[in-house]
Amino acid sequence: MEKSVPDPPETSTDDPLRDRSALYRAIDFHLTGKQPAPPDEMRFYNVSKDVSFEDTQLYVADLLRCASVTAYQCGDQLKGADRAMVYSIWHLLEIAKAMVDHSIECLGMKKG
């Protein structure tokens, strides 16, 4: 005899609450309303406390320039929808870079 409904997919036997630290962070957030700050040792990249705001902005501008060039070069190798998607990322990077460049210019105006 054939079944008209297929068997349900197998469920994993893993404990859905195995990441207890995530559960505790969620409970703390909902009970206290405070978002816990991630510990510095959990970050992939840490910024020195000695870096100034202006130096940070200049570094971000340089990172955006590099990402923009990378996206543009990748887009040249593609066709169709993939090319359009990469170029839309390139446009977003260019907008972000223009905003950072403007903020750097504003910092210069306030200094002088």
Image (cartoon, rainbow, N blue to C red):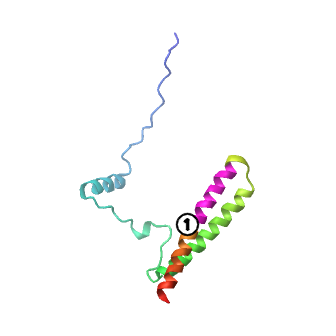
| Magenta region includes residue 86 | yes
| Magenta region includes residue 4 | no
**Rendered position, 20 above or below 3:** below
For label 1, the crowd category at 10 Å Cα-Cα, with few meaning under 14, some 14 to 19 and many 20 or more, is some
Magenta segment, which residues?
Answer: 82-96
Residue lying farthest to the top in this orientation: 1
Task: Identify which residue, 103 or 3, lies in the foreground.
Answer: 103
Callout 1 secondary element: helix
**In the displayed structure, does residue 63 sit left or right of residue 41?**
right
Residue lying farthest to the left in this orientation: 31
x 35%, y 55%: residue: 21
x 50%, y 15%: residue: 4
Residue 92: % across, % down: 58, 60
Task: Identify which residue, 86 or 5, lies in the foreground.
Answer: 86
**In the displayed structure, does residue 22 sit left or right of residue 10?**
left
x 68%, y 49%: residue: 82
x 64%, y 65%: residue: 68
Residue 61: % across, % down: 57, 73
Quadrant of residue 100 within the rendered picture: bottom right
Q: Please state which amino acid type lies under the numbered disc 1.
A: Ala
Name the main secondary structure of what is drawn in magenta.
Answer: helix
**In the displayed structure, does residue 16 sit left or right of residue 86?**
left
Residue 83: % across, % down: 69, 52
Which residue, given by chain and number where applicable, does mark 1 sit on?
A: 96
Task: Identify which residue, 92 or 55, lies in the foreground.
Answer: 92
